[in-house]
Image: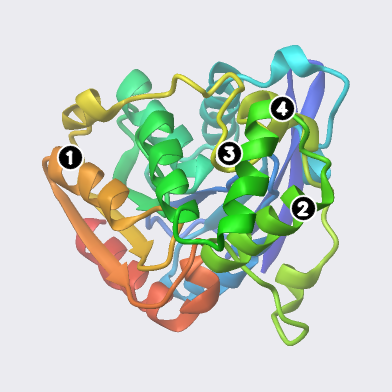
Amino acid sequence: MIQEGYMPFKEWQTYYRIAGAEHTGRPALVLLHGGPGSTHNYFELLDELEDTGRQIVMYDQLGCGNSYLDGHPELWTPELWTEELRQLTEFLGLKEYHLLGQSWGGMLAIRYMIEEQPEAVRSLILSSTLPSSALWAHEQHRLISFMPEEEQEAIRLAEETGNYEDPAYLAANDHFMKLHSSDIPETAPECLRRKKRSGREAYLYGWGPNEYSPTGTLKDFDYTDRLHEIRIPALIISGTNDLCTPLIAKTMYDRIPDSEWELFDGCRHMVFAEATERYCQLLRKWMESKD
């Protein structure tokens, strides 16, 4: 069963989608997508978790997908998206839930747990994410250092000049993302291939022009030294070939007191898409133990 709707948010509205839409009394699973601006679409792979008897809640954050908005560069701040998350959980009447954030969504989850300390969250699932923009940029540049020299030079020149339209840079960046993020084949599930309305403005002003150049409102994001303030169980998930390198994942694992870390061999940034069955089995076991 799928329920869709919109929550009024400021002058606009936020789209949400719930699989397993009947309340069963079990804590829901709330999913925070990446980007900023990436949409909920890929999370439909996790619809099967409704067989655990819980609601699987996903939404398009303001600025993308069915919550698309642009022409407002001043909006794209972590404060706005945190407020939207808080209001959505209240709007949907979620009394207990597990919170999963992937990539930027994990940054949002970390900020939400530390700044808001919501009592309704039973556990935190940090999937291919980061506690620090500076650490992330450092690790992306380390990964770039393993690429062919001409691609490294194209990326270096783009960062130096600010020209991110050069064909050599675009080809190098595309190769980098295929190595460490995703490469969607024609045989992939429909929700991965579906054309989506990405929030390009939200990404540019929130994060930056690419994964390794944080220049937006998140450029100084750093909760590394406050991760110990997360007082609920946390599951960290990453892939060996992920943008979230083992160093980034271990930084979170070392500093969150009650945490576990699952490293998926061979997976890139979308672990749940490349190892869906194992990922869902892990979440089933984790949530059952933390309900």
Kind of residue indicated by mark 3: Leu
Marker disc for residue 161: 4
User: Which of the two labelled residues, at mark 1 and mark 4, occupies the earlier sequence position?
Assistant: 4
Q: Distance between the residues labelled 3 and 4?
A: 46 Å
User: Which of the two labelled residues, at mark 3 and mark 2, occupies the earlier sequence position?
Assistant: 3
Residue visible at 52% across and 77% down in the picture: 274
Mark 2, residue position = 168
User: Which of the two labelled residues, at mark 4 and mark 2, occupies the earlier sequence position?
Assistant: 4
Q: How far apart are marks 1 and 3 (CA)?
A: 29 Å
Q: Is mark 1 on a helix, strand or loop?
A: loop
Q: How far apart are marks 4 and 2 (CA)?
A: 13 Å
Residue 272: give x, y in percent of width and height. 49, 69
Q: Distance between the residues labelled 3 and 2?
A: 47 Å
User: Which of the two labelled residues, at mark 1 and mark 2, occupies the earlier sequence position?
Assistant: 2
Q: Assign the C terminus to one quadrant of the image.
A: bottom left
Kind of residue indicated by mark 2: Ala
Q: Distance between the residues labelled 1 and 2?
A: 41 Å
Kind of residue indicated by mark 1: Ile
Q: Assign the N terminus to one quadrant of the image.
A: bottom right
Mark 1, residue position = 256
Q: Is mark 2 on a helix, strand or loop?
A: helix
User: Which of the two labelled residues, at mark 3 and mark 4, occupies the earlier sequence position?
Assistant: 3
Q: Nearer the viewer, mark 1 or mark 3?
A: 1
- Answer above or below: position of 76 versus 240: above
